[in-house]
Image (cartoon, rainbow, N blue to C red):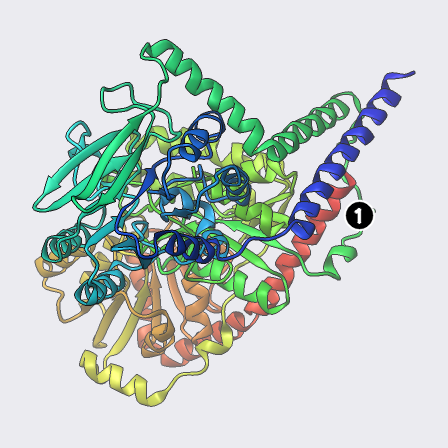
Amino acid sequence: MSRQNSLKILFYLNVLLVALVLSYKAYLNVFMAEVEAVHSAQIASIERRLADRDQFSFAVVGNINNSIGLFQNRLIPKLNDAGIDFVVSAGNAVSGGGGDNYQALQDTLRHLQLPYLLTFGSNEQEAFGDYRFYERFGSHYFSFQAGNSRFIFLDATGKTHWHWQIRWLQDLLQRDSATHRLVFIATPLLPVPEEPVSEQEDRTVLQPPLFRQQLLRLFQQHQVTAVFSASLPLWDQQQRGNTRFVVTGGAGDQLQGTANSFYHYVRVTVDSEGVHIEPMPLATGQHPVPRQLESLWLFVYSLFYVSYLNFILLISALMLVAIKLYTRVFQRRDYYPDYDLDPSPWLQQPLRVAMFSNSYLPAINGVSVSIERLRQGLSHQGNPVLLIVPDYQNSPMGTTESGVLRLPPLPIPGHWKTFNPGNIFLASIRRRVATFQPDLVHLHHPFWLGSLGLLLARWHRLPTIYTYHTRLEQQAHFVPLPGLLFRNLIAHWLTRRFANRCNGIIVPTNSSEEYLHQIGVTTPTFVQPTGVDYERFQRVDQGALNTLRQSLGLTNEAVLITVARLSNEKNLDFIIDAIHRLRHLTPRVFRWLLVGDGQERQRLQQRIHQLQLQEHITLVGAVPPDTIANWYHLGDLFLFASRAETQGMVILEAMAAGLPVVAVRSSGIDDVILQGNNGFKTPQRLDAWCARVVQLLDDEPLRQTLADNAREFGSQHSVAAFAANIKTIYARVLARSSRR
């Protein structure tokens, strides 16, 4: 049998294996009995057991973490024979919130011959596990009374806002008449002495501090008997007032190797003398070497038992990749363009697009606005879009916007304050992308989230599109490296390497395309300027405009407008110097409005005062995006001096509002401004630049002609046409990738 036939047989066997595994997974999801509201039945069983009883006992376990070797095989038999009435998990019963972990936990709990209850902890909430917990077990916080005791379960994850829990708990305790009150909350309220709380406070004690303080006050005021928590793999008991605080985490998690870190469960006995709490150690051996070997074995055993389907899928995927690599290495490849490509099959159907960007709304900049317009245009045409972007408000991931996955930020040094890096190390990102099932991946930056998107696209074998938005060499002042090193070497290398790993490059201007070819980019490029919402800039409320003029104290003076982030690369000092010179070059009274905010605001304001330009310059600051059209319509002329743009999208917005433009000539500007038609572009020389501004200020007929031409030019770049053109580029790249 030939090697090629052997590979074919191996390939089809592998495909069959994957199909069988997926079929079995579908069978489990469709035909296996679903469990719902388990806690309701368990509480009813506990109430029946403790009816008319003032003496009973139960076990508390913490950090089961889907343990098979320890919890299922060793601890559950002891619990079944311990003569107790029920079992409570103090949190982290699963190793993660995935459906396979919850299914494995329920398979484990079937061996338990006692009623059981689970506390909602961080592991239960992870990876969108909160809804799985709610569906399978019940509410994240609840209470019930059995015998002479009140059992209270709280949510420490932040999924349920702590204000609501405090109000609920206060009302509950005020009306409660139980003899004993037992609270279960996954995260400890008091620091454990052995834990470095000052360094890892978020992990070791309940957050936020105000929630913790309110709970401690309520527990002391209402004589709570005991509070049980997990999260840490150890045993600890402290007392504050009449309340005992117990930390138990020895039911399955890996140990720390300290004296108070050992495998155990907690036996709680309630009788006429009160509540007795006693740790029940498991005989696991004292020597650290066997203990570590056992932990390693439990990890490996759990991998096969808990996630064996995922494990088989992983091995199968690796085999498919290996076969694909083999065929790519030994199969003849044709590097000439294929002129027979037919993109029509992809143009005739909706395309699912996953986008990765380091910047997005509410951060206002050219990249964010461009992405939002593309998303709206594609969505309006029926193409689903998933955005993976940073979270600027620390909101729960993916819960505030449809089709947007917000990543919580990582802490970074202050010098990087203009860059908000999302946490790219979350496993949930890969799962969300896999669930979305994109047809292709669109990347908007050549690093961080862009690199993550490229990696996931390679993983799922999806074509990638990269939009070249930013001239990295002009961002050297943001990077903690020598400026010349970054500007002359690293920026070009990073752009070239990333672009050549993608399947297609979108550039906004011909000059940007020329730059990429000059630095060695060989990936096919497509010139497509970003669209503008042209109609939006035509609809202006005259009353609101008059109100705005009055608030700024504007009368008959000419109004010069610039919309830009207050940052070094925008070259705003050049315009300030020009304004200083202009007041001596023209008799026309004028005011320059600088709309935008940034880290350079204070320095620019000081410079304006030093040059005594307060009557001529107003730093407006950031304005709501839905009012920006009014600001453009205040103006008579748009000024721009940045040399770091790939397109200068605010220039198109200004033109759509009927403003001629005077700008410093650069690669991103050259293709947008038609010299003497919709504006002027000059070298970065004050005399040449100021001469064009004076020309338009003093020649009203010329300014009006350029304004009309600018509005006509802006009308040619609508969002709908922009999105349609981008989809055509997607279709061409998909056609080329499918042929390969």
484 above or below 391? above
Q: Quadrant of residue 464?
A: top right
Q: Is residue 362 left or right of residue 110?
A: left
Q: Is residue 513 left or right of residue 686?
A: right
Tag 1, which secondary structure?
A: loop
User: Measuring 21% from the left and 64% from the top, which residue is drawn there?
Assistant: 176
In the picture as drawn, the residue positioned furthest to the bottom comes out as 543
User: Measuring 68% from the left and 52% from the top, which residue is drawn there?
Assistant: 30
Residue 514 percent location from the top left of the image:
56, 43
The image quadrant where one finds the N terminus is top right
544 above or below 587? below
Where is mark 1, residue-wise?
341
For the residue pair 656 and 200, the one nearer the viewer reads as 200
Callout 1 crowding tier (Cα within 10 Å): few <14, some 14–19, many ≥20: some
For the residue pair 203 and 86, the one nearer the viewer reads as 86
Q: Is residue 365 left or right of residue 453?
A: left
Q: Is residue 484 visible?
A: yes
Residue 13 percent location from the top left of the image:
81, 29
Residue 140 percent location from the top left of the image:
37, 55
Q: Quadrant of residue 575?
A: bottom left
For the residue pair 286 and 546, the one nearer the viewer reads as 286
406 above or below 96? below
Q: Amino acid at mark 1?
A: Leu
In the picture as drawn, the residue positioned furthest to the right comes out as 1
Q: Quadrant of residue 463?
A: top right
Q: Is residue 439 visible?
A: no
For the residue pair 720 and 422, the one nearer the viewer reads as 422
User: Measuring 9% from the left and 60% from the top, which residue is drawn there?
Assistant: 609
